Amino acid sequence: MITIGNLQLAGPIFNASGPRCTTLEELQDLNRSMSSAILTKSCTLEPRIGNLGKRYWQNDLWSINSTGLANLGWEFYRDNSQGWDKPYIVSVAGLNLEDNIKIINGLQGHVGGIELNLSCPNIRGKRQVAYSYDMMEFYLRKIFDEDSIDSTFGLKLSPYFDHCQFVEISEIINEFKTEIDFVTCVNSLGNGYLMDGDQPAIEANGGFGGIGGKAILPIGLGNVSKFRVLLHNSIAIIGCGGITTGQDVKDYLSLGATAVQVGTAFMERGTSVFEQLYREILY
Ligand code: DHB
């Protein structure tokens, strides 16, 4: 058993928020799979259709997405929070602080875990709060002032690239070490652009999207490793980014991750990816 906050996971591998976790059928598939938790698509106060046009593309190396927070609205994820065979975690990506506070207060007590996503790169005019230190500190202060949160609580962070960024972000997160149970590193690399032949690989958002897949493994491993040294040891780190093999899972765990999430490989292979990865880490 793996313990993160109040959650008990049967193993260290589960789905990343994003692919195949928006609808009830998709959440039921995750329940039947070997994913050790059910993590939902990031939700907003109101349901959203998301960005228009083709919004996902991948090849063996990369994926690009600009879904634009298509989701069924936070109340759907609250109303379907019971009766699962494994921990149920809701990813929250309100469009502003007020929305985040409303959603977190509403989910609180109903769901096992909350992963507050401060790192969505795909909404025009909305910054990635995780890249704005003062704003991130302000958000966290307000959220934890409002209410004490019983649900296991974590943050989904953007990928960082400068050592000083890791130090500054860690100082902020460590201030809230009694409230924050985990951080997930990393979200996709924002505002990438890929060509499919002579065309942009996606139509949505002018072709710009978050980059995931095998190619971002070193960024994820680097982020987990930096944060494991800098964050208080009561804060678990969940590794995410570029996992395609059991060895990748082992590498994240050996660098200090308590668990890992799988995004692009789950999108590509469906729920069988969890069984494959568990088999590969056991043998
Ligand atoms: C979306 C993409 C993200 O990387 C994220 O963290 C949240 C939402 C999206 O485009 O739907």
Image: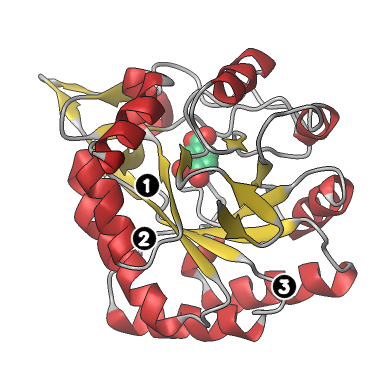
**Residue to which mark 2 is pinned:** 159
Q: Mark 1 near ligand 1 (CB under 8 Å)?
A: yes
Q: Are marks 3 and 1 in contact (CB under 8 Å)?
A: no
- SS at circle 1: loop
- Secondary structure beneath disc 2? loop
**Which residue is pictured at 36% across the width and 49% down the height?**
190
Q: Is mark 3 within 8 Å of ligand 1?
A: no
Mark 2 packing: few (<14 Cα in 10 Å), some, or many (20+)?
Answer: many
Q: Which residue is mark 1?
A: 188
In the rendered image, is residue 123 in sight?
no
Q: Nearer the viewer, residue 281 or 122?
A: 281
Q: Given the image, on which type of amino acid does mark 3 rest?
A: Glu
* Residue 252 image offset from top left, x and y in percent: 31, 57
Name the residue: 71% across, 58% down.
Answer: 6
Quarter of the image with the C terminus is: top left
User: Gap in Å between the C-alphas at discs 2 and 3?
Assistant: 22 Å
Residue 142 in percent (x, y) is at 79, 72
